[in-house]
Image (cartoon, rainbow, N blue to C red):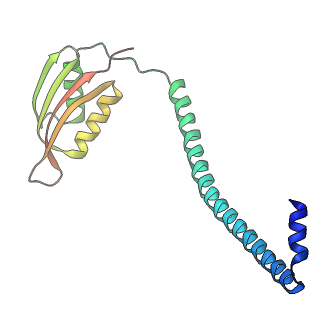
């Protein structure tokens, strides 16, 4: 193969050799520039991917710290009182008794409440307070009233069970 190429090369006139050498040089330069451009594009894409992965790693580190903090926190004891009584007490302590239309115990670990007209911010604060007491919101339907900020709410709460 090498001998055949040498024979072909030697059979070319000096001017043809010069043209072939120039074409080979241009082809080599074009190939080199194409490789450099491809490498630059790949480097740019990898830079963006690395930045995204670093942000994700930061979020995971923060989540790991939060998880460790939550695991180290003392567990809140689940109140063993009747859930209806607990919810009634929370309604009274939050000053929402005027808005309470109905409070029914479905069983010892589930209650249904209805508020006629309650400020939505007060409702959210009250639900958050119940969740701190290990009582979770199972179902909720809130309807906006004609007065801005007031809602009519029907909700079911359940006591979180120990696992």
Above or below — where is 1 with respect to 55?
below
Q: Is residue 79 left or right of residue 58?
A: left
- Foreground: 161 or 114? 161
Above or below — where is 65 with respect to 163?
below
Residue located at (20% from left, 13% from top) = 108
Q: Is residue 47 left or right of residue 148?
A: right
Q: Is residue 42 left or right of residue 6?
A: left
Q: Quadrant of residue 17?
A: bottom right
Residue located at (22% from left, 40% from top) = 123
Question: Looking at the rendering, in which quadrant would you find the C terminus?
Answer: top left
Q: Quadrant of residue 30?
A: bottom right
Residue 53 at x, y percent in the picture: 59, 48
Above or below — where is 130 with respect to 56?
above
Residue located at (14% from left, 45% from top) = 151
Q: Quadrant of residue 124?
A: top left
Residue 99 at x, y percent in the picture: 12, 37
Q: Is residue 84 left or right of residue 66?
A: left
Residue 16 at x, y percent in the picture: 83, 83
The residue lying furthest to the bottom in this view is 15
How many numbered marks have been drawn onto this rendered protein structure? 0
Residue 35 at x, y percent in the picture: 71, 65
Question: Looking at the rendering, in which quadrant would you find the N terminus?
Answer: bottom right
- Foreground: 114 or 16? 16
């Amino acid at each position: 193969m090498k001998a055949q190429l040498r024979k072909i090369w030697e059979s070319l006139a000096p001017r043809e050799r010069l043209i072939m050498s120039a074409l080979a040089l241009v082809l080599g330069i074009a190939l080199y520039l194409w490789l450099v451009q491809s490498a630059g594009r790949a480097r740019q894409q990898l830079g963006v991917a690395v930045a995204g992965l670093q942000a994700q790693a930061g979020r995971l580190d923060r989540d790991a710290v939060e998880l460790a903090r939550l695991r180290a926190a003392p567990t809140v004891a689940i109140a063993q009182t009747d859930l209806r009584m607990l919810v009634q007490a929370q309604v009274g302590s939050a000053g929402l008794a005027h808005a309470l239309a109905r409070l029914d115990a479905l069983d010892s670990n589930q209650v249904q409440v209805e508020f006629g007209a309650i400020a939505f911010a007060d409702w959210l604060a009250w639900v958050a307070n119940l969740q701190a007491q290990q009582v979770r919101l199972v179902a909720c339907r809130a309807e906006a009233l004609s007065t801005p900020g007031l809602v009519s709410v029907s909700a079911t709460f359940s006591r979180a069970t120990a696992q």
